[in-house]
Amino acid sequence: MAIKEGNGMDRSVQEVIWNLEDLYAHAGDPRLQEDRARCRKESEAFSRAYRGRVASLNGEELHRAVSRLEVLQERTRRLLSFSNLYFATRTQDSAASALRQAHVELAAALHRDTLFFEVEWNGIPEAAARALLEHPALASYRHYLQKIRRYQPHTLTEPEERILAEMGPVAASAWGNLFDKVLGRLRFGVEARTQSEVLSDLYHPMREIRRRAAMDLSEGLRSVLPILGHVFNTVLLDKAITDRIRRYPHWLRERNLENETDDQVVKALIDAAVSRYDLVNRYYRLKRDLLGYEELLDYDRYAPLPHVPTRTFRWDEAAEIVLSAFGRFSREMREIAAFFFDQGWIHAPVLPGKRNGAFSDPTVPSCHPYVLVNFTGTPRDVMTLAHELGHGVHQYLARQQGLFNSDTPLTMAETASVFGEMLVFRHLLDQTSDSSERLGLLCAKLEDIFATVFRQVALNRFEDRIHNLRRTSGELDVEEISLCWTSTQEEMFGNSVRLLDHYRTWWAYIPHFIHQPGYVYAYPFGELLVLSLFRQYQEEESAFVPRYLELLASGGKAPPGELLRPFEIELSDPLFWQKGLDLIRGILEEAEAQAGRLRTEP
């Protein structure tokens, strides 16, 4: 069934504009000012009631305190979500920007004024804290309080924590803002194009256009490399200092704590993925042959395959594909996804001033998620829609856990999004009989998976090398950074792709290194986890569905290992990660076989 308007006509993508009234009526809604005032008042009242008293609270009193904090943070999150969503579709509007910044600053001030709670909770002796956590009144908040205790060895005194919070806007985040401004203002080539415009040409069918785009990007980066190198060095040093102050044993420990995972789990993941770099080599050798090249160069990696039909989808077609694929898996999953279309929870058209990319914002448990895409009708756009609606279904189901238990760590955040993509991928493949189109689907899926798994692992290897080198050798010049970049990239590609000299500077435009050090391994973690779950689904079929939906509905109420126990998953076991890698190998073998059949077709 196609998505219909009330008058029975198929909806144009231009009409798919979200309705934010479930948060606030509009940017001038008086409830915004009222809620800001309530947040400030409640923050002050919370501080008066509990500052200096957390250690003396009994179970019922601690439950009341956490409940009040959750209500405060939910109201703050509601303000932030509205202003972020409002700004996302009007980034050139100074009033929208000012509203967003006002709420960002409000949230920072409220965090600063209530962080005493976490400091005092972590100051309680372990035995006393364990006894409190067993109190029946705290059952619903046990995991939230346990997550805070994970940082106990690294928590400073409240005055020290307040200083760090006060200095936050002029520390690493300020260098991140400079990074964004430098790259945002930078123009590439004789046509003075933006970074996004240049990068899009790496997908162009004409090799010369791809080559020129690569050279333009490299030349542009070289023109600001001293600035970007200084920014990178400063961020590396800032993290080294913070890690030393907080007594983190290595550069990735803070990220692992945030992701609720252990060092050995991350090592098992990385080692497993590195051990299968051969899959990268196999695929790009296949792509080289399909393109008819003697050698695949770095700017050929995203070249479209020749003779693959390019299909364009209408909005209603894309919606029906996603809903049908979800419905084949679970009626409930389809019904929830349909809410997004029927209730105005999606913003789909490409418009001036709208931010690029796509996301699903969970907002707050008392509301519902909103999805943003920039839909142009490409097959990739259909997969993006499936990805974000997967997030939306996950976030919708997890609302029942409340604010503190609904958010998942990054390592579990892709559990429904990647799964949704796989459902749509298999659905499209089943509906496609054309050999060239099937090969195109298989190769497009492999390239998406490689970007999420092997590329991100290579980025992790680069970060690991560069953080440790900065701590032992002092400030690094751009040549040293470029050498680390090239060597870790070559380890992944082997002899399947030749990296030209210009490629040495491409570390300089990747924002995760600056904004969120250590973030990137969450991508392969989530992808391989979901591929393993999808393999279970293929083996068990309908018996798998209830356990999977329960996993989504659990949100972040327990550590990942506990939530995954019904699936008999042991994250620290290297063999577990190999199951996801085996599924990638299976898709690659399908592509190789399909390419072989095409060669023999008349």
Image: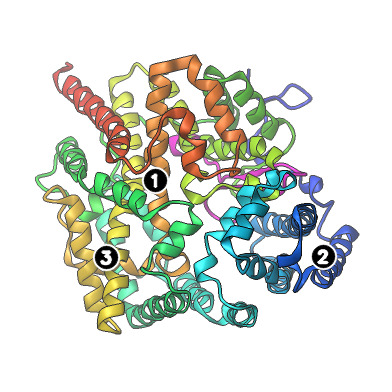
- Helix, strand or loop status at disc 1: helix
Amino acid on which disc 3 is placed = Met
> Mark 3 highlights which residue?
215
Residue at horizontal 75 percent and vertical 65 percent from the top: 56
Residue 314 in percent (x, y) is at 55, 30
Image x and y of residue 26, in percent: 82, 55
Residue 36 spot, x, y in % from top left? 83, 65
User: Residue 439: x percent and y percent?
Assistant: 28, 27
Q: Residue visible at 52% across and 34% down?
A: 386
The label on residue 39 is 2
Quadrant of residue 42 within the rendered picture: bottom right
Q: Amino acid at mark 2?
A: Cys
Q: Magenta residues: mostly which secondary structure?
A: loop
Q: Are marks 1 and 2 in contact (CB under 8 Å)?
A: no
Mark 1 is on which residue type? Phe
Q: Quadrant of the C terminus?
A: top left
Drawn side of residue 167 relative to residue 242, left or right: right
Q: CA distance from mark 1 to mark 2?
A: 36 Å
Q: Can you see residue 363?
A: no
Q: Which residue is mark 1?
A: 525
Q: Which residues are magenta?
A: 354-382
Q: Earlier in the sequence, mark 1 or mark 2?
A: 2
